[in-house]
Amino acid sequence: MNESFLEKLRFNADGLIPAIIQERKNGRILMMAWMNRDSLLKTIETKRTWFWSRSRQKYWMKGESSGHIQRVEKVSFDCDGDTILIEVEQVGAACHEGYKSCFFRDISGEGEVSANDEPLVKPEVVYKDKVREARRQEKEKDGSESSAELGGSKV
Amino acid sequence: MNESFLEKLRFNADGLIPAIIQERKNGRILMMAWMNRDSLLKTIETKRTWFWSRSRQKYWMKGESSGHIQRVEKVSFDCDGDTILIEVEQVGAACHEGYKSCFFRDISGEGEVSANDEPLVKPEVVYKDKVREARRQEKEKDGSESSAELGGSKV
């Protein structure tokens, strides 16, 4: 692959760039997550979305736990080179809370918050092995680190 | 306005949150820029998009120079509360380079970069007063700060 496009991009001080993920067939915004140089290259090469988790300090492929992968169809970047846009075909739900899109809550002109969608799947079913494992570890450690990690990530 | 929704949002260490701007009528992503608490409140109140410029350390309203305003139609936020999505009616071009969208360049699977659109307007016409003023200041100061500022912002 010709990697010279990387020169046109501006990664932040932590070496990261935000990536907007959009469902190509209908334009719906699914999520926003952070990529670094290598996860972007991997995304373009494998045609699956790879991110860098700031909280867990590790790479993750969208759908690796849930099966809800994103097939990459188009990659663009903005005029300043500091944001990536990736159009995908989304399998299942993008949001770890079971919604198609992570943007399932609106703010009205009066500041009221309301849901704009229903969950597509039940997270406890999609992530049942992960949830079971997290519970097991919690019991063992008598701590809640694993469940917090599960809850805080887009998987 | 009920401001309690702010508790659900996670601003970064600099007090900022990224806002994705989408054209409501066709789902096209126009730009991404940063808001702080006050510019978000102002955006919801005035139904125009207000941002915080990190480079210039000041508020700016999209379209204040160009007339290419964004009429706010819907505001959403994601599951983690760390990204805002704003659906708008865009007047004219969102990009300071004259394109409808800032995301006018694609990266192919081989890493090749190509334009995916033609400019909608000529920036030197849209920003003629600003360009003229910048040139005048440049002459006066024999510096290029003003033109750099013009070029680096989404106006």
Image (spheres, coloured by chain):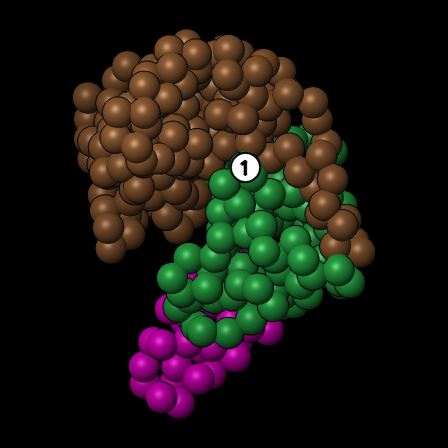
Chain colours: A brown, B green
Query: In this picture, is A76 found above or below B74?
Result: above
Residue B137 spot, x, y in % from top left: 44, 84
Chain designation of label 1 = B
Using residue A50 as the reference point, say whether residue A111 is left or right of it: right
Query: Residue flagged by tag 1: what amino acid is it?
Result: Cys
Disc 1 crowd, CA 10 A, few/some/many (<14, 14-19, 20+): many
Q: Secondary structure beneath disc 1?
A: loop
The answer to whether residue B95 shows anywhere in this view is no
Q: Residue B151 colored magenta?
A: yes
Q: Residue at x 26, y 25 (%)?
A: A140
Left or right of B98 in this view: A48: left
Q: Nearer the viewer, residue A120 or A142?
A: A142
Q: Which residues are magenta?
A: B127-155
- According to the picture, the residue beneath numbered tag 1 turns out to be B79
**Does residue A137 show up?**
yes
Which residue corresponds to the image point at 50% horizontal and 32% vertical from the top-left?
A31
- Please tell me whether residue B83 belongs to the stretch shown in magenta: no
- Classified by dominant secondary structure, the portion drawn in magenta counts as helix
Image spot of residue A102 (x, y percent): 55, 31
Asked which quadrant contains residue A67, the reply is top left
Please identify the quarter of the rendering in which residue B45 is found.
bottom right
> Relative to A151, does residue A65 appear above or below in the rendering?
above
Q: Horizontal placement of B90 versus A99: left or right?
A: right
Q: Tell me the residue at 40%/65% (across/down).
A: B14
- In the displayed structure image, the side of residue A108 where residue A31 appears, left or right: left
The residue positioned 60% from the left and 68% from the top of the image is: B38
* Residue A37 in the image: above or below residue A131: below
Asked whether B114 or A74 is in front, the reply is A74
